[in-house]
Amino acid sequence: MGTPSPAPRYSNPVLNTDFPDPAVLKASDGFFYAYATQGGGANIQVARSRDLVGWERLADVLPVKPEWASKTQDFWAPHVHEDRGRYYLYYSAKPDAALTDTSRGLCLAVATASRPEGPFTDMGRPLQCGPGFVNIDPMAYDDPATGKRLLYWGSGFEPIKVQELGPDRISFAPGSAPIDLIQPVKSEDPAEYQRLIEGAWVLKRGGWYYMFYSGDNCCGPKAHYATLVARSRSATGPFETLAAATGAPNSVILERRGNWVAPGHNSVAEDRNGDQWILYHAVDSRRPRSKPTDDVNSRRVMLLDRLVWRDGWPRLATGGPTETPQPRPR
């Protein structure tokens, strides 16, 4: 049951099953929970761990589809936020209306539960809908400087956005509006990775707000994905990318290395020693499918690597996804 291994080292992957878009939560019960896009028969996947290395898969946290998306099967990129013993699951789903109206795209949604493992119950209506897959990859964040409840999201070749949530956390604050934070870059340069951007994850460190985000093609035959970073003095921007701030050729801190293809869509956790660890998905080129009939580069497993901070920016301690045994979290 997520019991720490006595071994002093670990090797990737830490969860060797299709588990895309992992978002980690250190819950008040002492466990780390990682939530992921649909798979393995679950609408929203979850696994838990005591030490970020030994993971136990649990039952579907959203076992009952929302009424407005009861006939579709697109439940993507969840994030769970805990507030005073209540758990809020932010995710995206394709509405039933999209089955007959091709102009309808995915919606942001919210469900709640009294336990981090669920079951979660959808609030009964989408939070926001729009065309294509613009409204995906939500991440809820409480700004320690202002106390505002914020929701980041975005993809679909549009900017990553943020908007204030209301006190109920299931609606946007009255009078609030989305703010564009990071813009996609129209470029065919494969080193750019920003033609499409998504998967925002925000943390504060040393007076800066850091946004980790990913681009540009998560999976499939043309998988080309990496994790990038930007920072700001405010949770609502403006954000400056690593490249703009340092003159680096791009803002990438994590990209393909060795057998690990298209690494990205990360979250960050902290161990008992205060070290920070990046959890993310990647494709194992030695086993890129779950089933022979699946598309190539569709089996995204969960990896773990340590973050370090250099000159005010996060980096991977090893420079990229690891394949050899590494010192485990404490």
Image: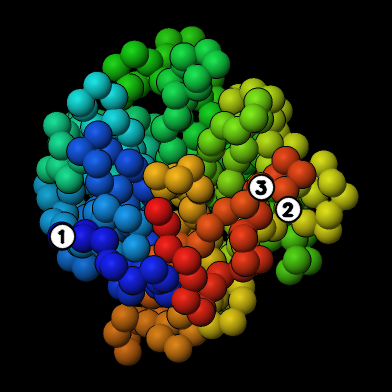
Q: Where on the picture, by quarter, is residue 292? A: bottom left
User: Which callout, 1 or 2, points to the residue nearer the camera?
Assistant: 1
Left or right of residue 136, residue 37 in this image = left
Q: Nearer the viewer, residue 196 or 271?
A: 271
Q: Give the position of the N terminus as an image quadrant.
A: bottom left
Distance (Cα) linking label 2 and label 3: 15 Å
Q: Is residue 307 above or below residue 174?
A: below
Q: Nearer the viewer, residue 84 or 5?
A: 5
Q: How many other residues sit within 10 Å of disc 1, few (<14), some (14-19) or many (≥20)?
A: few
Q: Which residue is mark 2?
A: 251
Of the numbered discs 1 and 2, the one sitting upstream in the chain is 1
Residue drawn at 42 percent across, 32 percent down: 140
Q: Which residue is mark 3?
A: 309
Across and down, in percent, residue 92 comes to 35, 45
Q: Which residue is mark 1?
A: 1
Q: Is residue 206 above or below residue 245?
A: above
Q: Looking at the picture, which amino acid does disc 2 mark?
A: Ser
